[in-house]
């Protein structure tokens, strides 16, 4: 393949790979902006992948799988919101607990429902949806406008979220809750309502991110297939300064590293493949070294709010 | 409001309390800290749900479940600690939560215009486009009041609004309140400061220990009667430090001849790395209390932290009994006899999930007899703790009780006990009686004076001029990191101090 | 802390936890019944396999060792308010270090080699914990993130070591050649094999308790976790505490790794970390960070785990079922705390 074709191929794969990062990170961002720090992404994504796959496999319909995944994500989001916002339990501990449960259920369900088979059970993967006219543009058309619909959705979602957060009064109120929940509450902007809503929507996005993996990549569910993308999504959220537009940009970086590592493994670069496998995680850490100090997270991130709490 | 009752767990904050507010009146709501005034107003504003009681507005019964309801009914509240979002602008803070049509861009020009009109009408100047993190406390308070005015409230509740104001700014505030009342509003003015409430209120209600004490017309009230109502029968006013007419005795006020603490041209940086305290010098003798007045945010916190080694001293030196302590670590300073009562006792000095004994140990956990060779001597720690609990009258079940259950006054007693658990040379006390009930305030003062007579040098940083004037031998004023001047006790004058707090330098 | 136990109050304190266990079993039991299995048989296998035979009990003790160490690897940083989710990677890297020492110095006598192997594991694990600690100290990066990422990196490392450096050509699964005989932990029992690691684990448990509850340094750790700002104001070097706690956590997990290498496998096997990390965290959270309770909870979980594999072998019920039970116990225990508050 000549260099130009290689580049196009690379870019196309990156576009393909950004989806789980964007969806999971935007989900994290939404909750975080109200002060709810969800650390269960990895578990929700795994369960979303597992149930999304099972739903599609058992019914033959991709949409059934997606619906099941969304439902699961919503449930986990609801649980997180309930335990932390209403019962006032520690957000990290609950997040970890939900991560464990998602992890366990993600391997339990396939084992019970399908059992162990010789050949991995398969579903048909998502097809590319070329956008008329735009996909005809040389190079750019192929890279950007000939992807599956979830890629388009991820990008449009990010743009919508930017507009929503910064150009609407809803966004103003949402961000206020994460910056100073007591101030917002005292003006009639309900903190708990917003935390519940963002947790549920966030959970749905995370589950969808997970479901993308069997639906777009391999066509089946394998244990651990999320491979840390949930955790990397947290890094991406910080890296993007908890803003939807920078998260979109940052996702390209992480997707790029993932594709790069893959390319090197396949292409035979002389580097032992184990080290290439480590690349995305090392890259994430390096990125964090620069991002953490520069980034301003919502002031009340990770802290619960109690209206009746008396300060002595 | 009728028959309101509110408890927090086992603590009864309000017991069958009633309050009647007339139209076009400034109603002073007086009581010591912890009496329940803020709690009652929080019920009115929908932040707290009462266990019992009813609220009537214009004769009709109303249900207030949340601030949203209160705002709809025309009730607004200005909290003691401003509820503002630092990164937002003045306009954004004020319009937050109001009906905004979602036009393509969040254009707030119209709203900003309305804010300017309001600010001019009531004499509360603000710049609508400024960010909260960039403006001063006085302006921030105006923003807080404008939040309520913008929503067209009929009833405005002000919770301790004068804490961070200079005497001159207090006068300006009271003028604005008169304008509001003339326009048809009613104002509830919560405070524990007698003289202020007398000077501005039409009627005054006194709350004591969560119960109604009395309601009088402003013209008929006197300081004496109000004090008696605030304090109740349990306290002997003659012996009281705060209320007795005689003031401190000559022996109590005596100052030793030797200068124990010498601060020489120190420079301390703020959080952004810029010098905040520059070229600052003063000295404190043994048995002397040096008061430090100033509006919050002018360097007091940084000064305290610099003296305690929490913040580095960028230039100059600090000497204690001739020894240069400028480079020492906090743990070394504590061992040397520098003690501290931080102003934010909860966040800066308290371990809620730990036991009382563990709290008393904080900062002294490496020193004998509590620790030997790295191992803790729990029997010794507990013996000391029991002694401190009785000596400082800390209401607790015992040294093992989890400290989270302690009330504000008791927490401060723990802080005091801890500060004086080892012989001390210098005490840095920052707003030591903030939020305390009258009895606890008396206790803190008596302990400080007791230690003073035994030789302690004290730096008393406070926003309460009455407190400073009561206890200090001299008062220095800090403004933007500089000392504007030091007044001797014979020349104490509130308005003079107020001028210095606003940046006017005094020749000594 | 305060001396003196009261038997009745102790029992009362544990009642909610007991209820949590019962509730989780009931929940799982419903699931098992729906799947068509015999619920009572399942319960019996899970709970009693450990006590039915000497072998079962030995298996339980063998599982107990890494579980209790990994629980401590989580609770010690937790005391300082830090979440160490990297026990897995720290254990793996510790195991790599132990195996490296055991293989490269294979000819040394036990008196030298064994301590070296164990020590190598501790140091390597401490190092793996020091990296996120340093990232936190220097760059302020949240340690939940970095410790987890380090886990993933360690997977690559162990695969590389087991398939490239000291590969055992006859093994079907990535494994190294055995370590020298001098590096093997002596057996307390030969049949079933029970290695001396259990003694080390118990000693460590005592040491951890003494450290956190009875030393000034331990006090600083706890104060830091209780209120970092107040601790700083009163002279504790809080940032150093964070660093130290994570390094200690890494050392404990690394010790688990070296014991697995020296005692159980006598070589480095990919996957030796099993699910100890997650179980360790669950144990730590159920014990609510109380280092006195950790060994008891760890033993209980070890019993459940042995029961789980037995159940999978004999009844064909997936072992994940027990994992769900354990996760549910955690959830119910946390909920009982909320109820207790009211």
Image (tube, grey):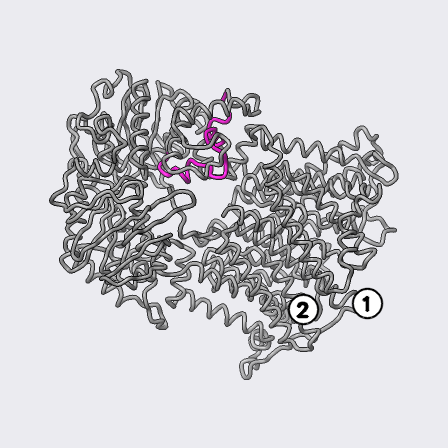
**Comes first in the chain, label 2 or label 1:** 1
B218 lies above or below C200: below
In the rendered image, residue B364 lying in the magenta stretch gets the answer: yes
Q: Is residue C135 left or right of residue A178?
A: right
At 39% from the left edge and 42% from the top edge, which residue is drawn?
B11
Q: Is residue B467 left or right of residue A23?
A: left
Inter-mark Cα distance, 2 to 1: 18 Å
At 22% from the left edge and 62% from the top edge, which residue is drawn?
B58
Q: Is residue B320 left or right of residue C89?
A: left
Q: Residue C242 sits in which quadrant?
A: top right
Q: Which residues are magenta?
A: B342-368
Q: Chain of mark 1?
A: A
Q: Position of residue B73 (x, y in %)?
A: 28, 63
C8 lies above or below A32: above
| Secondary structure of the residue carrying numbered label 1 | loop
Q: CB atoms at circles 2 and 1 under 8 Å apart?
A: no
Quadrant housing the N terminus of chain B: bottom left
Quadrant housing the C terminus of chain B: top left
At 30% from the left edge and 26% from the top edge, which residue is drawn?
B446
Q: Residues within 10 Å of mark 1 (few under 14, many from 20)?
A: few
Q: State whether residue B94 appears in this view.
A: yes
Q: Residue B236 sits in which quadrant?
A: top left
Q: Nearer the viewer, residue B28 or C194?
A: B28
| Secondary structure of the residue carrying numbered label 2 | helix
Q: Position of residue A33 (x, y in %)?
A: 45, 58
Q: Which residue is mark 1?
A: A118
Q: State whether residue B326 appears in this view.
A: no
Label drawn at residue A214: 2
């Amino acid at each position: 393949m000549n260099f130009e074709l290689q580049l196009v191929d690379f870019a196309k794969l990156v576009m393909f790979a950004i989806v789980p990062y964007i969806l999971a990170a935007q989900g994290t961002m939404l909750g975080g902006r109200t002060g709810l720090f969800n650390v269960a992404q990895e578990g929700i994504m795994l369960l979303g992948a597992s149930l999304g796959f099972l739903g599609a496999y058992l019914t033959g319909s991709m949409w059934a799988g997606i619906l099941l995944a969304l439902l699961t994500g919503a449930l986990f989001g609801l649980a997180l919101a309930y335990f932390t916002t209403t019962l006032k339990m520690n957000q990290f501990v609950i997040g970890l607990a939900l991560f464990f449960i998602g992890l366990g259920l993600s391997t339990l369900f396939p084992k019970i429902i399908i059992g162990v088979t010789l050949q991995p059970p398969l579903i048909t993967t998502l097809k590319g949806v070329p956008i008329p006219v735009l996909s005809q543009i040389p190079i750019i058309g192929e890279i950007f406008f000939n992807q599956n619909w979830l890629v388009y959705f991820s990008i449009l979602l990010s743009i919508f979220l930017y507009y929503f957060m910064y150009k609407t009064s809803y966004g103003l109120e949402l961000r206020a809750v994460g910056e100073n929940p007591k101030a917002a509450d005292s003006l009639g902007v309900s903190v708990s309502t917003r935390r519940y809503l963002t947790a549920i929507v966030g959970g749905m996005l995370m589950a969808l991110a997970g479901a993308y993996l069997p639906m777009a990549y391999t066509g089946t569910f394998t244990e651990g297939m999320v491979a840390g993308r949930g955790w990397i999504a947290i890094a991406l959220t910080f890296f993007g300064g908890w803003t939807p537009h920078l998260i979109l940009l940052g996702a390209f970086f992480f997707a790029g590293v993932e594709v790069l590592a893959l390319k090197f493994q396949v292409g035979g670069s002389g580097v032992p493949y184990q080290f290439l496998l480590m690349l995305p995680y090392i890259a994430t850490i390096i990125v964090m070294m620069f991002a953490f100090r520069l980034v301003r997270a919502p002031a009340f991130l990770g802290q619960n709010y109690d209206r009746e709490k008396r300060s002595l | 409001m009728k028959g309101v009752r509110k408890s927090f767990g086992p603590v009864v904050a309000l017991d069958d309390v009633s309050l009647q507010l007339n139209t076009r009146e400034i109603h002073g709501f007086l009581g010591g800290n912890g009496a329940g005034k803020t709690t009652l107003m929080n019920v009115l504003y929908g932040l707290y749900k009462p266990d019992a009681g009813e609220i009537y507005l214009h004769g009709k019964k109303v249900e207030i479940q949340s601030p949203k309801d209160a705002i709809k009914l025309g009730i607004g509240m200005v909290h003691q600690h401003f509820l503002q979002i630092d990164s937002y602008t003045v306009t954004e803070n004020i319009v937050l939560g109001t009906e905004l049509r979602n036009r393509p861009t969040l254009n707030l020009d119209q709203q900003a215009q309305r804010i300017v009109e309001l600010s001019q009408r009531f004499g509360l100047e603000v710049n609508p486009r400024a960010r909260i993190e960039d403006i001063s406390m006085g302006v921030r308070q105006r923003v807080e009041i404008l939040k309520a005015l913008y929503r067209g409230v009929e009833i405005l509740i002000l919770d301790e609004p004068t804490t961070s104001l200079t005497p001159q700014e207090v006068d300006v505030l009271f003028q604005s309140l008169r304008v509001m009342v003339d326009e048809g509003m009613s104002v509830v003015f919560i405070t524990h400061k007698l003289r202020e409430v007398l000077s501005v209120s039409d009627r005054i209600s006194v709350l004591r220990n969560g119960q109604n004490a009395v309601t009088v017309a402003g013209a008929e009230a006197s300081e004496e009667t109000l004090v008696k109502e605030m304090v109740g029968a349990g306290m002997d006013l003659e012996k009281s430090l705060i209320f007795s007419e005689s003031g401190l005795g000559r022996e109590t006020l005596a100052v030793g001849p030797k200068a124990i603490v010498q601060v020489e041209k120190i420079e301390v940086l703020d959080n952004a790395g810029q010098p905040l305290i520059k070229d600052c010098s003063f000295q404190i003798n043994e048995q002397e209390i040096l008061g430090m007045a100033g509006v919050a945010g002018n360097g007091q916190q940084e000064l305290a932290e610099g003296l305690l080694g929490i913040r580095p001293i960028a230039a100059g030196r600090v000497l204690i009994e001739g020894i240069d302590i400028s480079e020492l670590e906090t743990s070394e300073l504590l061992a040397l006899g520098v003690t501290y009562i931080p102003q934010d006792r909860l966040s800066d000095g308290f371990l809620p999930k730990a036991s009382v004994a563990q709290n008393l140990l904080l900062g002294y956990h490496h020193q004998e007899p509590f620790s030997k060779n790295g191992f803790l001597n729990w029997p010794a720690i507990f013996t000391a703790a029991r002694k401190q609990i009785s000596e400082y009258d800390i209401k607790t079940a015992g040294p093992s009780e989890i400290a989270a259950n302690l009330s504000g006054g008791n927490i401060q007693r723990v802080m005091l006990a801890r500060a004086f658990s080892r012989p001390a040379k210098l005490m840095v006390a920052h707003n030591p009686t903030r939020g305390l009930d009258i009895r606890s305030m008396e206790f803190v003062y008596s302990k400080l004076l007791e230690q003073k007579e035994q030789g302690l040098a004290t730096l008393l940083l406070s926003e309460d001029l009455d407190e400073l004037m009561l206890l200090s031998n001299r008062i220095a004023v800090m403004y933007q990191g500089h000392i504007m001047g030091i007044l001797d006790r014979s020349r104490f004058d509130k308005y003079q101090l107020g001028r210095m707090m606003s940046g006017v330098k005094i020749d000594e | 802390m305060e001396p003196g136990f009261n038997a009745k109050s102790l029992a009362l304190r544990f009642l909610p936890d007991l209820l949590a266990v019962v509730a989780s079993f009931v929940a799982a039991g419903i699931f098992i019944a729906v799947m068509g299995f015999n619920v009572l048989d399942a319960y019996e296998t899970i709970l009693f396999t450990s006590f039915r035979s000497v072998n079962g009990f030995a298996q339980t003790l063998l599982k107990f060792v890494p579980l209790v160490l990994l629980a401590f690897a989580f609770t010690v940083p937790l005391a300082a308010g830090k979440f160490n989710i990297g026990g897995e990677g720290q254990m793996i890297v510790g195991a790599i270090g132990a195996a490296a020492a055991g293989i490269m110095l294979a000819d040394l006598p036990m008196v030298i080699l064994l301590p070296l192997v164990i020590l190598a594991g501790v140091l390597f694990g401490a190092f793996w914990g020091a990296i996120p600690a340093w990232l936190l100290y220097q760059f302020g990066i949240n340690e939940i993130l970095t410790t987890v990422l380090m886990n993933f990196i360690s997977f690559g490392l162990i695969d590389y070591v087991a398939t490239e450096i000291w590969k055992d050509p006859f093994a079907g699964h990535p494994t190294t050649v055995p370590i020298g005989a001098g590096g093997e932990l002596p057996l307390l029992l030969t049949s079933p094999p029970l290695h001396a690691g259990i003694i080390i684990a118990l000693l460590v448990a005592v040491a951890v308790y003494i450290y956190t509850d009875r030393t000034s340094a331990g006090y600083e750790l706890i104060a830091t976790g209780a209120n970092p700002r107040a601790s700083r104001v009163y002279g504790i070097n809080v940032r150093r505490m964070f660093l130290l706690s994570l390094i200690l956590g890494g050392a404990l997990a690394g010790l688990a790794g070296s014991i697995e290498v020296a005692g159980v496998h006598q070589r480095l096997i990919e996957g030796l970390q099993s699910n100890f990390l997650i179980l360790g965290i669950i144990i730590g959270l159920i014990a609510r960070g109380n280092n006195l309770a950790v060994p008891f909870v760890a033993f209980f979980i070890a019993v459940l785990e042995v029961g789980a594999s037995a159940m999978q072998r004999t009844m064909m019920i997936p072992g994940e079922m027990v994992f769900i039970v354990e996760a549910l116990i955690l959830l119910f225990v946390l909920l009982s705390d909320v109820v207790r508050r009211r």
